[in-house]
Image (cartoon, rainbow, N blue to C red):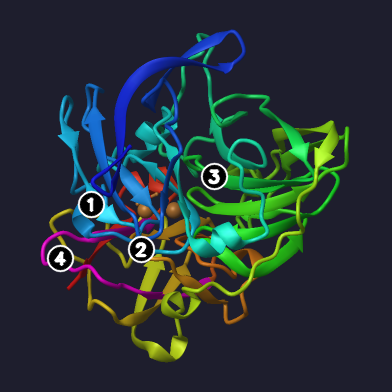
C-alpha cells in the first residue's frame, strides 16, 4: 500500500506446511504464507516502510540483501525480532533497478531460517530499466526463479545436516519458487528469468538444455550491454537476469549442469557433479513479439559509477576454512571502520582449496580483477556477492555512501550459510 508517499509492506514470519514434492506435506516457514515470501517491488526515489512481524517461536530478523540503506534498517544480527514482536524499518530506495532479495540474518541461525523457507525477492525499478527493451510483465514474461535444494526424510520433513561437514547441506531435491518440477507457460518470444540462488550451500551452473541465453543483469543491476552465454554460475546469494528466446510450441529446460567450481579439492563432495532440472519453459503455439534486449546509457550511470582512481583505501581479507583475517564473528568487536563517501579496494583472498561466497552489505561493488585478470562477463556488472574460487584473489571496488552510524555496523561475510553461522563474518562501521 502507498500512503502519505510511503510504500508500506507487511511481512509476517510464520510456520506452515508446503507440498515441495507433490502429495507430501512438508513443515516449512514463510512470510505471509507457509513458504518463501511475496515479491516486494519499489521504485528508485521511493520511500519504503516495512512492518516485520515474527509469529515464529524463535527470534529471527529480516535483511534486505543488496540494498543500500542505513545500518539500523539493514536487518542483520543487530536488529533481532523476538517472537511476537514487530520491527519497522524505513528507508528511501536510492540505487539502480535490480533483483534484490530478503531473508533472515539472526546470529548463528541464518542457515536454518533460510533453509526452512524464509526468503523472498525485492525488485527495484528505475526509469532506465523501464525504458530498456526487456520483457517486464511480472509473472508473464518476467519470471522469478528462486532456486533452492532440500533434503527430505521419509516423513517429508526438511533435514539440515548438522555435522559441520563441507559445504553444509546439499539437497538432492531442487525446488524452484518452492516446488519441485516447476514449469512456466510462455506466451511471448522472449522471457526474462530473474535467477536467485537462495540455497544455503550449493553452487549452480544454470543454463538452457539446448541454446544460449542473454545475460542482462547481475546482482545489482543491468550490465553495460547484454552478453550471450550458455550458462551462469551462481553461488549462494548471487543473482542474475537472463533473457531466453523461444519458438512457438517448443519446450526447453533451464538446468543446473555440472558446475565448474574452479579448482576445488573434491568437486563431487561439493555437488560439482550433480545435475538438476530447474524450470521447464513451455511455449504456446502463438507467441507475442518481444524486442531484442537492449538499453541506452542509464541517466544515473555517472553518479553510480565507481572509479578505481578514486580509491583511497585498500583493505585485505584472507579467508580460510571459517575465519576472515584469522577471526570469527564477534558482535562486540568492530573489525573495520570506513569513511562515508570514500572509494575502497577490497582484496579478498580465498586461501584454501574450498570455495566461499563473499558478500558485503550496503553496497554494490565492481570486480576489478580475479588473480590479476579481467573478470568474466558474469562478474562484469554490479555485484554484492561473489563466488570465490579456491586460492584466488578478487579485487573489489566499492564506496560506502550516504549513511553513517557510530555504533551499528554493516556485515560482510561468506554467504555459504553454514560458514556464516560458524563465524565467517566481520563488522564494518561507516562513519
Ligand atoms: Cu544475504 Cu548478510 O546476507
Ligand atoms: Cu546482505
Ligand atoms: Cu564460506
Residue 410 makes an appearance in the image: yes
Quadrant in the rendering for residue 35: top left
Kindly identify which residue carries mark 2. Answer: 94
Q: CA distance from mark 3 to mark 2?
A: 24 Å
> Residue 111: image x %, image y %?
38, 38
The magenta segment is: 393-413
Please give the label number shown on residue 114.
Answer: none
> Image point 39% across, 43% down: which residue?
102
Of residues 383 and 100, the one nearer the viewer is 100
Q: Which residue is mark 4?
A: 405
Q: Few, some or many C-alpha atoms within 10 Å of disc 2 (few <14, some 14-19, many ≥20)?
A: some
Q: Residues within 10 Å of mark 4 (few under 14, many from 20)?
A: some
Q: Earlier in the sequence, mark 3 or mark 1?
A: 1
Q: Secondary structure at mark 2?
A: loop
Pair 4/2: label in front: 2
Point 59% across, 24% down: residue:
179
- State whether residue 109 is above or below residue 324: above
Distance, label 3 to label 4, CA atoms, is 31 Å
Q: Residues within 10 Å of mark 3 (few under 14, many from 20)?
A: many
Image quadrant occupied by the C terminus = bottom left
The answer to whether residue 272 is above or below residue 370 is: above
Badge 1 element: helix
Task: Say few, some or many: other residues with alpha carbon within 10 Å of mark 1 (under 14 / 14 to 19 / 20 or more).
Answer: many
In the displayed structure, would residue 15 be above or below residue 7? above
State yes or no: discs 3 and 4 in contact (Cβ < 8 Å). no
| First along the sequence among labels 3 and 2 | 2
The numbered dot on residue 197 is 3
In depth, the one of 288 and 39 nearer the eye is 288
| Label of residue 73 in the image | 1
Q: In the displayed structure, does residue 425 sit left or right of residue 147? A: left
Q: Are marks 3 and 2 in contact (CB under 8 Å)?
A: no
**In the structure shown, which secondary structural element does the residue marked by tag 3 occupy?**
strand
Amino acid at each position: 500500500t502507498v500512503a502519505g508517499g510511503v510504500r508500506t509492506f507487511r511481512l509476517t514470519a510464520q510456520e506452515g506446511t508446503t507440498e515441495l514434492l507433490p502429495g507430501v506435506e512438508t513443515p516449512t516457514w514463510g512470510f505471509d504464507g507457509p513458504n518463501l515470501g511475496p515479491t516486494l517491488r519499489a521504485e528508485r526515489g521511493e520511500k519504503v516502510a516495512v512492518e516485520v512481524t515474527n509469529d515464529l517461536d524463535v527470534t529471527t530478523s529480516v535483511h534486505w540483501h543488496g540494498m543500500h540503506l542505513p545500518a539500523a534498517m539493514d536487518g542483520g544480527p543487530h536488529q533481532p525480532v523476538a517472537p511476537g514482536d514487530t520491527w519497522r524499518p524505513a528507508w528511501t530506495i536510492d540505487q539502480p533497478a535490480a533483483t534484490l532479495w530478503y531473508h533472515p540474518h539472526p546470529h548463528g541461525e541464518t542457515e536454518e531460517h533460510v533453509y526452512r523457507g524464509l526468503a523472498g525477492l525485492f525488485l527495484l525499478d528505475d526509469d532506465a530499466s523501464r525504458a530498456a527493451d526487456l520483457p517486464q510483465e511480472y509473472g508473464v514474461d518476467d519470471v522469478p526463479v528462486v532456486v533452492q535444494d532440500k533434503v527430505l526424510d521419509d516423513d517429508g520433513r526438511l533435514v539440515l545436516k548438522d555435522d559441520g561437514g563441507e559445504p553444509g547441506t546439499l539437497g538432492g531435491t531442487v525446488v524452484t519458487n518452492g516446488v519441485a518440477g516447476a514449469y512456466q507457460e510462455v506466451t511471448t518470444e522472449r522471457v526474462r528469468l530473474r535467477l536467485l540462488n537462495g540455497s544455503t550451500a550449493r553452487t549452480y551452473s544454470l543454463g538452457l538444455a539446448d541454446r544460449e541465453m542473454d545475460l542482462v543483469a547481475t546482482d545489482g543491476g543491468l550490465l553495460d550491454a547484454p552478453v550471450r552465454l550458455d550458462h551462469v554460475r551462481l553461488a549462494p546469494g548471487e543473482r542474475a537476469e537472463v533473457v531466453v528466446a523461444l519458438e512457438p510450441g517448443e519446450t526447453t529446460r533451464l538446468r543446473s549442469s555440472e558446475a565448474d567450481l574452479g579448482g576445488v579439492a573434491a568437486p563431487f563432495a561439493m555437488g560439482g557433479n550433480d545435475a538438476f532440472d530447474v524450470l521447464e519453459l513451455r511455449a504456446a503455439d502463438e507467441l507475442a513479439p518481444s524486442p531484442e534486449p537492449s538499453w541506452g546509457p542509464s541517466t544515473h550511470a555517472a553518479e553510480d559509477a565507481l572509479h578505481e582512481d578514486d580509491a583511497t583505501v585498500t583493505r585485505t581479507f584472507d579467508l580460510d576454512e571459517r575465519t576472515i583475517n584469522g577471526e570469527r564473528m564477534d558482535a562486540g568487536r568492530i573489525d573495520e571502520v570506513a569513511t562515508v563517501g570514500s572509494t575502497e579496494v577490497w582484496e579478498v583472498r580465498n586461501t584454501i582449496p574450498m570455495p566461499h561466497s563473499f558478500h558485503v552489505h550496503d553496497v554494490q561493488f565492481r570486480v576489478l580483477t580475479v588473480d590479476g585478470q579481467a573478470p568474466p562477463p558474469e562478474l562484469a556488472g554490479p555485484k554484492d556477492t561473489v563466488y570465490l574460487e579456491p586460492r584466488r584473489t578478487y579485487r573489489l571496488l566499492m564506496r560506502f555512501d550516504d549513511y553513517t552510524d557510530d555504533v551499528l555496523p554493516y556485515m560482510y561475510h561468506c554467504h555459504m550459510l553454514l560458514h556464516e553461522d560458524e563465524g565467517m563474518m566481520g563488522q564494518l562501521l561507516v562513519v
